[in-house]
């Protein structure tokens, strides 16, 4: 995989990829649990020892039909479960292989904090998992946003090497990487990765929307007016701004809060109780739990108007977001299915009403003749309101609401036996305190949240269970005018007057209401600003639709309104919308426009980005999206089950089909892959996953407690991991299959405070009022600090040695300057569409980026700084020029050609966007192109690479590798190219796995294909044995076997190599035979039959402090507080030297500048003692210029062009236009009669 470097881009997957992955995950039956934000941030700093955050096997399997997000646990759960089970690698690999070609990545930042101090790749710092971070514009908090994935076998300065494709904690993926440096090893997840959900995904209360179920109004509600664009797909909707600020809906002018930042508590369970407040200025109900504008799922209403002689009856359902859905009258004993909205309204023979959504959750309101609340004025005579009484899912989990005589909520119970009590304000009747009176399984009782209101009953303060104020609000005329979050970021809003109100038609407001307007329409926000400088001046207008007739003919809605905003930078944005407030055109500050077409049922039919490419959609009679057709005409089809509204089949553009079967409760029981393999799932009575049988017959078992929290996982090898939780449902203890225990301690609001690892070491965190980590103290103990802007963007990082990195942001809150530990500045410049167009580096180098109309980079220019003047003449040395790379894309945004000054690269893809061919051509002086190299790739029906062919077009030589895979996608065989003169001899490398893909043998086979009956002859290369955690503990290599002793964290304590003929049982570092053998090394008592031994010892933070090699002696290391090695002492054994006694120790001392550049220790000592004058050399522009007797010279791009080692060796380095090393010339003993010169040249294939 391509190595990741400083400033490589990061990005998130597009929404169409999300939708496709959701459909495929139906086959996997593994849902990610809700994560506690504080725990996510905390585990991010520490999760290195936890090695591998992955999927949380939680209680909530929403896409399988299980309801209401059944569990909430600490974010650390994901790390432990993924590590213990090994399931995540397989599941995500299969899903992502199938969805790689759907949509494009949304670039949201670059890698920038802080990079390796001593390892550069293409003149950029190498990036590492665990240690390095990035600022993601999509997830500015919590910080630091560290790289979570990396290689399991390649480490850079103690950190796992990061590669293109690896993810960060916020779930962003590294999008770009080195063209000429590849890093091997399996992808390993070291830190917790957050749920990769966009705001629209989080805000949508109805899970079917994530699968494209039904028409948009049913699932988007008020939020749908603004954020339906994410539904389109990243490839087409890339660049559209769906909301303004924090946030305002451009089309309606309404103010909304989607609940993601206003979730006050969650009680986990198969049907969890989630107190997530949703605010909409379009919701004018005054008697909701928290007052006007605020709504909860428990504020749902059903307005019933029985039929009369004057008019037929009618129903109005008020959803959890306060949106009104008009429905026809339903007689007792009948039901009505509203396909446009996605609701079924039932009326029992006894007259009780219930509304059922597409997840088969029943919202029960009771009969009309029960206690009701009569609506005045605007409701009309005879209209009665039924309050929500009960919520029930298909598994008979329920939540019951108890109300007083005034229909105010006073108590809530659920099927687990919980009792929640609500205390009301005497005057307003608002809820002031929410407390858990009775819990389940030792659940912590007491206060959950509390609230304060102004004199008019409007919510003004929210306090958490500790009494800390976390949200504040202010209102004028019943509309929110100010809000502040826990970090102190204030947002203010100015509304148009009642005489000018021009928003959607008022709903639920009587003529005598104080909130009525002269126009009968909602008031809209006309100005919005924040305390950190973000501003929007907004105006609205109407359009004369000249296209109305044309739109009617096409069965689409014409635009009728326009919204224009000007922000603090003077940037102008424009939104056009139709009569249903669907976005029909967005124009960005660069005057680039996106057009969207909608059906009268609010089904998105087409999106056309500025480049003119079209993305089209088709639907069935139930409003289910059945097809997506991209700009290349490729069609992805989905066939839906009409009972459960789950996908029965997904047909990809190449014709391959994924099929799914469901049980009578709508849970997926069988997933059929295109290659005929199947995965089977079994569930308990609560709908929670109980067993997974993979396509090879391996069985994984899961067990949950009453709250739906995973308490036991047994992998397909029978190894058991147990999970324990505290009274709030946070993960408290994990016991692995070897009995190792990891303990976690959480604060009252869920932040991870302490983590005690299996080796007994403890780490701790401190947080600010907004729940962001301010300090992390390791086991030594040493502390690292962070600070943030009000917006939550990382502002400073002070490491354990008090070295600081500072980040500043421009007026649009984009990263503008990064100041490293040496006080050197990196600068970033953006265009009006917030795309980075220039980066300025320390050495004066600049990188500029050009974009096409759709926002894709089409050219990258590397502008050099000043060249060093090399010592002596360098043959062929030319002053550095601009390096320009042009990127050509097809209509789907795929890179089809790359052009540099000397080479062109051509890329071809199949219909699933899998690379099928890469061709490298040289640009000739006459303008022609000469083929140099071609790589071709072939895939099977599930996306496994099965053949790769490399051809040297100059010599005509060609080599092919063929691969076979098992049903789980593990590579089982690679057929090697035939030997010259022996084409009939078939050679292969074979890989044997157990369980879900743990490698346990590699062998070489050879077979004569000319003899039909000949059998392959196998030769063992390596046998591998693993412990209960599937860690390698024994390996054979020819006539040698090596055993490994590991500590509870998987660190190697000992390696014992002996003859393969000797009996070699597994051993621990504390075992007497090992202790005797390793302690006798280098002495007269050493037994030659003991073989080669290596022993290792670590400090409390995992740094290697001492090692012993049975032939070479002992080595000790000393580090600074940030893990930079300061001293190494090597003590050879007496027996390995002459008989002159104990040899002298060999020591090395290392020093660094504040940014981690290595310094010449002797020179620094002389400078400190003032025995020489300060020089400009050593380290300049973040490049090492002099170290010991070595001098380094660089070109304007920061590439090493000459290295002089004393007077005895001179080396020169040559680079191509892509900054790849092409030649190294080494001259030894220059200027003498013994001078020798050696040149090594490098060439690169089409893949770099």
Image (cartoon, grey):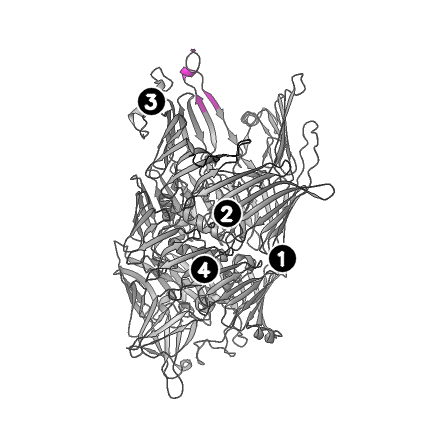
Asked whether 1138 falls inside the magenta stretch, the response is: yes
Residue 80, percent across and down? Answer: 36, 45
- First of labels 4, 2 by sequence position: 4
- In the picture provided, is 1178 more to the left or to the right than 939? right
Q: What's the distance in space between the residues labelled 4 and 2, CA to CA?
A: 33 Å
Magenta range is 1129-1147
Question: In front: 1159, or 633?
Answer: 633
- First of labels 1, 4 by sequence position: 4
**Residue located beneath label 4 in the image:** 201
- First of labels 3, 2 by sequence position: 2
**From the viewer's perspective, is the residue at label 3 or at label 2 nearer?**
2
Q: What's the distance in space between the residues labelled 1 and 4, CA to CA?
A: 27 Å
- First of labels 2, 1 by sequence position: 1
Residue 1127, percent across and down? Answer: 47, 27
Q: Image height check: is 326 above or below 806?
A: below
Q: Are discs 1 and 4 less than 8 Å apart at CB? A: no
Q: Image height check: is 862 above or below 221?
A: above
**Residue located beneath label 3 in the image:** 1077
Count neighbours of disc 4 (C-alpha within 10 A) and say few if under 14, some if 14 to 19, many if 20 or more: many
């Amino acid at each position: 995989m391509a190595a990741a470097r400083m400033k490589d881009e990061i990005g998130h997957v597009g929404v169409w990829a999300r939708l496709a992955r959701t459909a495929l995950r139906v086959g996997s039956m593994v849902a990610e649990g809700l994560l506690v934000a504080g725990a996510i941030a905390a585990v991010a700093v520490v999760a290195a020892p936890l090695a591998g955050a992955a999927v949380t096997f939680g209680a909530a399997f929403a896409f399988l039909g299980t309801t209401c997000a059944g569990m909430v646990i600490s974010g650390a759960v994901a790390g432990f479960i993924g590590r213990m089970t090994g399931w995540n690698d397989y599941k995500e690999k299969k899903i992502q292989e199938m969805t790689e070609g759907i949509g494009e990545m949304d670039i949201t930042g670059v890698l920038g904090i802080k990079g390796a101090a001593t390892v550069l790749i293409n003149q950029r710092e190498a990036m590492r998992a665990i240690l390095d971070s990035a600022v993601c514009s999509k997830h500015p908090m919590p910080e630091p946003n560290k790289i979570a994935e990396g290689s399991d076998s390649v480490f850079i300065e103690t950190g796992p090497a990061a590669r293109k494709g690896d993810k960060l904690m916020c779930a962003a993926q590294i999008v770009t990487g080195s063209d000429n440096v590849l890093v091997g090893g399996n992808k390993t997840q070291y830190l917790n990765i957050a749920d990769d959900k966009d705001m629209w995904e989080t805000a949508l209360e109805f899970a079917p929307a994530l699968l494209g179920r039904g028409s948009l109004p049913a699932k988007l509600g008020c939020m749908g007016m603004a954020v339906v664009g994410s539904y389109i797909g990243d490839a087409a909707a890339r660049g559209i701004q769906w909301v303004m600020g924090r946030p305002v809906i451009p089309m309606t002018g309404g103010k909304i809060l989607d609940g993601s930042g206003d979730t006050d508590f969650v009680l986990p369970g198969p049907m969890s109780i989630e107190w997530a407040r949703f605010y909409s200025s379009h919701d004018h109900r005054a008697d909701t739990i928290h007052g006007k504008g605020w709504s909860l799922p428990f504020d749902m209403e059903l307005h019933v108007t029985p039929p009369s002689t004057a008019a037929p009856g009618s129903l109005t359902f008020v959803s959890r977001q306060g949106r009104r859905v008009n429905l026809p009258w339903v007689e007792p004993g009948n039901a009505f299915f509203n396909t446009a909205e996605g609701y079924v309204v039932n009326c029992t023979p006894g007259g009780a009403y219930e509304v059922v959504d597409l997840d088969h959750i029943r919202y029960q309101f009771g009969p009309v003749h029960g206690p009701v609340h009569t609506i005045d004025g605007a409701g009309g005579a005879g209209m009665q309101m039924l309050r929500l009484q009960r919520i029930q899912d298909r598994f008979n989990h329920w939540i019951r609401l108890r109300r007083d005589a005034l229909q105010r909520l006073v108590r809530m119970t659920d099927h687990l036996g919980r009792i929640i009590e609500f205390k009301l304000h005497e005057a307003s009747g608002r809820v002031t305190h929410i407390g858990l009176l009775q819990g389940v399984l030792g659940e912590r009782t007491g206060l959950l949240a509390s609230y304060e209101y102004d004199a008019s009953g409007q919510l003004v303060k929210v306090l958490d269970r500790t009494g800390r104020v976390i949200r504040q609000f202010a209102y004028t005329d019943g509309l929110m005018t100010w809000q502040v979050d826990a970090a102190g970021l204030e947002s203010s809003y100015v509304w148009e007057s009642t005489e000018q109100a021009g928003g959607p038609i008022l709903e639920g407001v009587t003529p005598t209401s104080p909130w009525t307007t002269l126009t009968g329409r909602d008031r809209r926000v006309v100005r919005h600003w924040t305390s950190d400088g973000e501003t929007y001046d907004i105006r609205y207008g109407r359009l004369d639709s000249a296209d109305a007739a044309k739109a009617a003919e096409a069965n689409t809605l014409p635009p009728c309104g326009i919204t224009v905003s000007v922000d603090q930078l003077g940037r102008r944005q424009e939104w056009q919308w139709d009569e249903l407030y669907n976005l029909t055109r967005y124009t960005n500050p660069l005057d680039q426009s996106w057009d969207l077409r909608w059906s009268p049922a609010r089904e998105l039919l087409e999106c056309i980005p500025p480049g003119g490419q079209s993305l089209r959609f088709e639907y069935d009679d139930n409003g289910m999206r059945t097809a997506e057709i991209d700009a290349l005409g490729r069609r992805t089809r989905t066939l839906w089950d009409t009972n459960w509204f789950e996908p029965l089949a997904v047909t990809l553009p190449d014709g391959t089909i994924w099929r799914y079967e469901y049980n009578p409760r709508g849970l997926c029981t069988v997933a059929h892959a295109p290659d005929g393999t199947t995965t089977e799932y079994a569930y308990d009575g609560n709908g929670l996953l109980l067993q997974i049988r993979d396509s090879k017959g391996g069985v994984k078992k899961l067990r949950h407690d009453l709250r739906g929290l995973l308490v036991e996982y047994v992998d397909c090898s029978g190894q058991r991991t147990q999970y324990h939780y505290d009274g709030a449902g946070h993960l408290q203890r994990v016991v692995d299959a070897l009995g190792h225990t990891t303990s976690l301690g959480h604060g009252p609001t869920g932040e991870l405070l302490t983590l005690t690892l299996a080796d007994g070491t403890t780490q701790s965190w401190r947080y600010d009022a907004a729940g962001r980590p301010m300090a992390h103290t390791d086991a030594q103990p040493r502390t690292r600090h962070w600070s943030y802007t009000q917006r939550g963007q990382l502002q400073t990082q002070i490491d354990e040695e008090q070295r600081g990195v500072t980040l500043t942001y421009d007026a649009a809150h984009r990263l503008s300057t990064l100041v490293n530990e040496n006080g050197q500045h990196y600068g970033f410049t953006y265009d009006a569409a917030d795309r980075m167009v220039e980066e300025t580096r320390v050495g004066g180098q600049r990188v500029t980026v050009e974009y096409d109309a759709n926002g894709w980079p089409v050219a990258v220019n590397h502008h050099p700084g000043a060249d060093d003047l090399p010592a002596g003449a360098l043959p062929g040395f030319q002053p550095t020029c601009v390096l320009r790379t042009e990127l050509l894309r097809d209509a789907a945004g795929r890179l089809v050609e790359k052009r540099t000054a000397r080479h062109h690269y051509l890329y071809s893809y199949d219909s699933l966007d899998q690379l099928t061919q890469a061709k490298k051509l040289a640009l000739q002086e006459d303008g022609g192109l000469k083929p140099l190299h071609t790589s071709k790739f072939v895939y099977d029906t599930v996306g496994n690479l099965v053949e790769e062919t490399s051809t040297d077009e100059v010599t005509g030589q060609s080599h092919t590798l063929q691969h076979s895979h098992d049903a789980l996608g593990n590579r089982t065989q690679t057929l090697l190219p035939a030997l010259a003169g022996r084409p009939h001899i078939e050679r292969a490398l074979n890989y044997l796995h157990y369980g879900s893909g743990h490698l346990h043998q590699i062998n070489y086979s050879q077979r004569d294909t000319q003899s039909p009956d000949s059998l392959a002859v196998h030769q063992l290369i390596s046998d591998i044995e693993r412990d209960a955690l599937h860690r390698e503990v024994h390996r054979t290599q020819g006539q040698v076997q090596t055993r490994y002793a590991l500590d509870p964290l998987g660190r190697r304590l000992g390696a014992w190599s002996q003859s393969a003929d000797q009996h070699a049982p597994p051993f621990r570092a504390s075992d007497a035979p090992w202790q005797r053998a390793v302690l006798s090394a280098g002495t007269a008592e050493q037994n030659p039959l003991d073989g080669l031994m290596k022993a290792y010892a670590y400090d409390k933070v995992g740094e290697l402090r001492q090692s012993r090699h049975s032939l070479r002696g002992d080595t000790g290391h000393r580090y600074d507080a940030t893990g930079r090695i300061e001293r190494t002492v090597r003590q050879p054994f007496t027996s390995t030297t002459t008989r002159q006694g104990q040899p002298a120790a060999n020591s090395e001392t290392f020093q660094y500048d504040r940014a981690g550049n290595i310094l010449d220790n002797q020179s620094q000592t002389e400078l400190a003692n003032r025995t020489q004058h300060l020089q400009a050399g050593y380290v300049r522009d973040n490049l090492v210029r002099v170290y010991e007797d070595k001098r380094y010279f660089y070109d304007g791009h920061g590439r090493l062009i000459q290295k002089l080692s004393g007077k005895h060796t001179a080396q020169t380095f040559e680079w191509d236009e892509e900054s790849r090393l092409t030649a190294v010339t080494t001259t030894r003993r220059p200027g003498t009669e013994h001078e020798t010169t050696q040149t090594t040249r490098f060439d690169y294939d089409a893949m770099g």
